[in-house]
């Protein structure tokens, strides 16, 4: 065999060719793909709508392989061993692999031709376009993919309805009890569920249901199952199943010895497998056979875990058994059920809604003796401490066992990226990554959380040490539990911890030496060594008098002046010795530090709100000012931003903030964990319709809990995502007080509020602190001669020394 | 720190020893050169050029002082490259280094040798 032709360029085709190459195949490979793109990660398709780029989704290029994109194969001549494409190209083969995948099933409903499906990047683009002018959407099908599509429509801003033929959602993964808990979650998120009905017809701008109901929607997406793309095989006389699928043997070969079929188009052992894990295994089996091996595909684990709309749903093993044990908490929205053999010894399977922990810990025990009593496993979560047998499957996407992972660890792999690289576990859906961490920890590998070479502790641990032992200086702390004299990583981190807990002046005593240059000079350094000045303008509201003072100061010191993205004014180009003079003028006019330089609260932006705006339902400016004044000066692991919008139109962009507030008729909705910047993330709804005092109490707790437990330079977005249990866990801690720490968090915030002092006022009033604001210790009056400006658009701009004139590398 | 064995050089007094804060830098203008001075935890005084070779800004005196292994260091406040206070070598990119100057303390005054 030296000419291999692959029809279809999806994940399975990619895996097949990749495996073939890695096993040293040196023949000629041609891959035909009907889509205009090379193979991409279809499992992660939805992330494309959330901003993940095509480059990130595409699989690595296959070296030495001819790939023909936008090229649909239309015929196979088995006698001549040639495939032909739509555009007339003919390609001879010695071995042919069909990896044509499947197509969404579109039921024969009147009007269905105007509807969308959810399978390719192209489909998503079409849906995105249609959604941009629409208000409401319908997803037909409430299974795994249907919910994913519904989430995507919701993300595109549509009021989304789900129509499911079965009496409950996700009938293939959960039973009726789980379905009812799931429906509660889905409805709470604002999606409407219509279960137990089908579609009667699709008309322009409305959908008619079998029970006579009508949904006025212009975007309809079908996600009602898949059908294997077996048309090529059928046309050339190969056997296909009654319900579709190219019939192959356990070696993935059709009745024609030169033709294999793998992936979602193949019917093996009477089954079509619609998950990527089994498809990959099939590809590997086929390769082994082509190279003369005897690998066989004997079915696969169809367990699934998904996290959609913040709800975890998982199913593993069998969905029935002689005995079952159920844990149900309708209030907390949790449903967990285990199926057990009649002798109550063997675990057969399980269903989880709202908490998928048992999936991770118990799936490897399917078919094995129960590691503890079922109720213990469901109630206490003690399963986390279980030891997995070597043959237990850890990663179902890539069929990796606990034994294989342990072997890699014995061979010296000591972190998750290393395990991913050498075993492939964790590289597909990612749901087994917690297991990998557990296996590493159990094997005695310490996952380093050390801050830097001077401390073996994480930021959160140092925070606790400082808090519990009452440490007040860096020297004390490094003598107690560190080594050396610190660095630019641990010093500012400890400075921030000390400031969060003790709120003294950042330039007091030894603390001055810990600060980054920005905190040290209470201003942001610029590329030419000058600084910027940003006075606080709470909520963006400013009197004409204060505006005039800012203008006068800028004019008198010749500073470049710009309105920032944070609703305030930035003055650039101040030399160190000018900073105190500038701030004296500003402080006298009633301004204070805006902490633009600190890992601290930045701005609380606001829209104009109900005072002026005809749509406003609450006073967003008033709340923004109150919040900015409450949390000003609060030092934190990273900067903190907030915004308040006066109604759901959201002019203040609150959902891009660490904590954002949107007014409702009844009160306020609080969103947390938003981020702009490098990796944008929309904030998640934490509580809704709360009155102002309760809102502030919850924000107090949120911020203090973040400050106590986050990593150094971890924004709230990354922190919320890193919490085990995510938003639900966060809510349980700071809303339901599950750890009993809320009183202490609030008290700590009260102490911050009570002891806040403007650090610029304190600085200009203290000659000792002022003495360091000079360009030169030996010539305090002399400005730095290397700082030079030119003029652009009537304002100054730095002139820099070209680096090549320094005789140094760029 | 003291380099008494080196050939005759000019010593320029720049400031009182106590004007330097422990583990913090300051800049002195010495015969037209910008010299970054650092007083480390053990009381030593080090001097290197103030010019950050990576950005062309005169700012090294404003970086964070610390240690890497046994070596006393400063991290540029611009893009955080770490320099040895003893040799001037950039520990993150040994192909780059900055000038160093000898220092001594005489009668409570810091002197820089040129
Ligand atoms: C001045 C301003 C740009 C402007 O002219 O509008 C600005 C300027 C700087 N930003 Fe920004 N950011 C400014 C609004 C923003 C915004 C928009 C906003 O806040 O509404 C964002 C995105 C929102 C967000 O943070 O989630 C933003 C995302 C960043 C980031 C990326 C953060 C991230 O999580 O990825 C950095 C880098 C960092 O903090 O590590 C950054 C860092 C910086 C620094 C501090 C970079 C530096 O170290 O020199 C800039 C210096 C400002 C100075 O010298 O005063 N700036 N920056 C804005 C000041 C707002 C203010 O009044 O305080
Ligand atoms: C939104 C979404 C989410 C999913 N989530 C998960 C998940 O969480 N976990 C999981 O395990 N699975 C998931 N899946 C399923 C998974 O994506 C599939 O199992 C996998 O893509 C199957 O790969 P394949 O290569 O066999 O088929 P496909 O991905 O369908 O690839 C087949 C390719 O062949 C091309 N083709 C077909 N006919 C021809 C022809 N005649 N000529 C040329 N090219 C042709 C098609 O255009 C297509 O590009 C998801 C699928 C979708 C759509
Ligand atoms: S968010 Fe609402 S209240 Fe605020 S300005 Fe916009 S429309 Fe007006
Ligand atoms: S289970 Fe999907 S990557 Fe491991």
Image (spheres, rainbow, N blue to C red):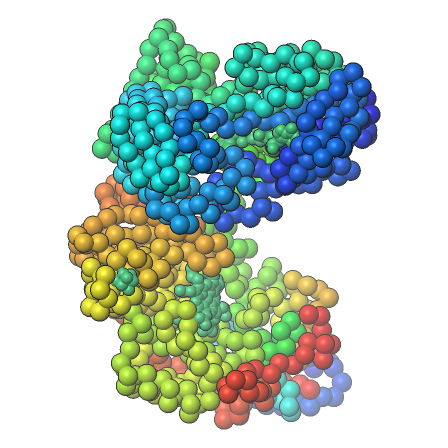
Q: Residue at x 52, y 47 (%)?
A: A52
Q: Residue at x 66, y 67 (%)?
A: B90
Number of labelled discs? 0
Asked if one can make out residue A372 in the rendered structure from this viewpoint, the answer is no
Image spot of residue A586 (x, y percent): 34, 84
Image spot of residue B84 (x, y percent): 63, 68
Position of residue A298 relative to residue A696, above or below, is above
Rendering quadrant holding ligand 3:
bottom left
Image spot of residue A631 (x, y percent): 29, 64
* Quadrant containing the C terminus of chain A in the rendered view: bottom right
Q: Residue at x 45, y 54 (%)?
A: A680
Position of residue A439 relative to residue A756, above or below, is above
Q: Could you tell whether A481 is left or right of B82 in the image?
A: left
Image spot of residue A697 (x, y percent): 22, 55
Position of residue A383 relative to residue B92, above or below, is above
Q: Residue at x 60, y 83 (%)?
A: A799
**Which quadrant of the view contains residue B95?**
bottom right
* Quadrant containing the N terminus of chain A in the rendered view: top right
**Which quadrant of the view contains residue B8?**
bottom right
Q: Could you tell whether A202 is left or right of A748 in the image?
A: right
Position of residue A623 relative to residue A86, above or below, is below
Q: Residue furthest top?
A: A343
Asked if one can make out residue A341 in the rendered structure from this viewpoint, the answer is yes
Closer to the camera in the image, B97 or A250: A250
Closer to the camera in the image, A465 or A285: A285
Closer to the camera in the image, A240 or A665: A240
**Which quadrant of the view contains residue A497?**
bottom left
Closer to the camera in the image, B105 or A456: A456
């Amino acid at each position: 065999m030296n000419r291999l032709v692959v029809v279809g360029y999806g994940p399975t085709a990619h895996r097949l060719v990749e495996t073939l190459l890695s096993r040293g195949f040196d023949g000629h490979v041609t891959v035909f793909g009907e889509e205009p793109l090379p193979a991409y990660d279809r499992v992660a398709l939805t992330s494309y709508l959330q901003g993940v780029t095509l480059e990130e989704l595409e699989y690595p290029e296959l070296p030495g392989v001819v790939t023909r994109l936008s090229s649909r194969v239309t015929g196979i001549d088995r006698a001549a061993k040639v495939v032909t494409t739509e555009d007339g190209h003919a390609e001879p083969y010695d071995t042919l692999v069909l990896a044509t995948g499947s197509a969404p099933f579109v039921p024969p409903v009147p009007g269905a031709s105007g509807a969308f499906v959810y399978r390719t990047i192209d489909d998503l683009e079409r849906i995105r376009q249609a959604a941009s002018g629409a208000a409401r959407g319908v997803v037909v099908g409430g299974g795994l993919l249907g919910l994913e599509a519904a989430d995507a429509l919701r993300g595109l801003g549509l009021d989304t309805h789900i129509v499911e033929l079965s009496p409950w959602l996700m009938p293939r993964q959960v039973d009726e009890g789980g379905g009812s808990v799931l429906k509660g979650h889905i409805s709470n998120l604002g999606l409407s569920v219509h279960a137990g009905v089908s579609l009667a017809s699709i008309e322009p701008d409305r959908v008619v249901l079998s029970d006579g109901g009508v949904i006025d929607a212009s975007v309809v997406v079908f996600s009602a199952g898949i059908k294997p793309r077996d048309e090529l095989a059928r046309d050339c006389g190969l056997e296909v199943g009654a319900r579709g699928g190219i019939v192959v043997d356990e070696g993935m070969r059709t009745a024609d010895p030169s033709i294999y079929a793998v992936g979602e188009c193949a019917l093996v052992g009477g089954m079509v497998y619609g998950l990527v894990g089994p498809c990959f295994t099939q590809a590997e089996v086929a390769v082994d056979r082509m190279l003369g091996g005897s690998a066989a595909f004997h079915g696969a684990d169809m367990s699934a875990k998904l996290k959609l709309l913040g709800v975890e749903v998982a199913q593993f093993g069998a969905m029935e058994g002689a005995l079952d044990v159920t844990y149900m908490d309708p209030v907390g929205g949790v449903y967990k059920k285990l199926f057990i053999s009649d002798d109550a010894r063997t675990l057969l399977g399980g269903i989880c809604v709202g908490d998928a922990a048992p999936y991770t810990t118990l799936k490897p025990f399917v078919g094995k003796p129960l590691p503890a009593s079922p109720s213990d496993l469901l109630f206490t979560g003690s399963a986390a401490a279980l030891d997995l047998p070597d043959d237990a499957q850890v990663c179902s996407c890539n069929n990796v066992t606990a034994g294989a992972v342990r072997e890699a660890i014995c061979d010296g792999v000591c972190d998750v990226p290393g395990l991913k690289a050498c075993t492939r576990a964790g590289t597909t859906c990612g749901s087994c990554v917690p297991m990998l961490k557990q296996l590493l920890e159990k094997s005695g590998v310490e996952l380093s959380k050390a801050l830097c070479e001077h401390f073996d502790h994480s930021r959160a641990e140092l925070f606790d040490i400082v808090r519990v032992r009452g440490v007040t200086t860096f020297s004390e702390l490094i003598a107690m539990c560190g080594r050396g004299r610190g660095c630019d990583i641990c010093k500012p981190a400890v400075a921030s911890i000390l400031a969060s807990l003790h709120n003294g002046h950042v330039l007091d005593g030894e603390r001055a030496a810990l600060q980054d240059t920005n905190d040290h000079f209470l201003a942001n350094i610029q590329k030419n060594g000058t600084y910027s000045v940003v006075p606080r303008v709470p909520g963006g509201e400013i009197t004409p008098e204060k505006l005039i003072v800012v203008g006068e100061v800028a004019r008198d010191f010749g500073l470049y002046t710009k309105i920032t993205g944070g609703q305030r004014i930035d003055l650039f180009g101040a030399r160190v010795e000018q900073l105190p003079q500038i701030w004296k003028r500003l402080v006298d006019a009633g301004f204070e530090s805006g902490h633009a330089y600190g890992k601290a609260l930045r701005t609380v932006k606001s829209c104009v709100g109900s005072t002026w705006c005809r749509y406003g339902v609450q006073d967003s400016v008033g709340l923004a000012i109150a919040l900015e004044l409450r949390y000003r000066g609060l030092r934190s692991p990273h900067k903190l931003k907030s915004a308040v919008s006066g109604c759901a139109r959201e002019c203040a962009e609150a959902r891009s903030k660490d904590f954002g507030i949107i007014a409702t008729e009844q009160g306020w909705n609080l969103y947390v964990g938003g981020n702009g910047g490098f990796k944008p993330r929309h904030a998640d709804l934490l509580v809704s319709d709360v009155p102002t005092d309760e809102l502030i109490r919850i924000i107090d707790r949120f911020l203090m809990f973040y400050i106590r437990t986050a990593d150094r330079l971890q924004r709230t977005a990354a922190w919320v995502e890193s919490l085990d249990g995510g938003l639900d866990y966060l809510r349980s801690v700071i809303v339901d007080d599950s750890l009993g720490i809320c009183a202490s968090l609030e008290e700590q915030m009260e102490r911050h509020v009570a002891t806040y002092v403007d650090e610029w006022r304190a600085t200009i009033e203290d000659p000792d602190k002022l003495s360091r604001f000079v360009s030169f210790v030996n010539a305090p009056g002399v400005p730095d001669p290397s700082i030079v400006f030119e003029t652009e658009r009537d304002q100054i701009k730095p002139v820099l020394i070209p680096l090549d004139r320094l005789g140094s590398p760029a | 720190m003291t380099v008494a064995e080196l050939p005759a050089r000019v010593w320029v007094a720049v400031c009182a020893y106590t004007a330097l804060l422990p583990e913090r830098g300051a800049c002195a203008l010495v015969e037209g050169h910008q010299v970054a001075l650092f007083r480390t935890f053990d009381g030593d005084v080090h001097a290197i050029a103030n010019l950050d070779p990576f950005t062309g800004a005169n700012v090294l005196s404003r970086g964070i002082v610390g240690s890497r292994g046994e070596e006393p260091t400063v991290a540029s406040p611009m893009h955080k490259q770490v320099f040895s206070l003893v040799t001037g070598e950039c520990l993150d990119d040994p192909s780059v280094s900055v000038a160093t100057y000898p220092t001594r303390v005489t009668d409570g005054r810091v002197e820089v040798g040129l």
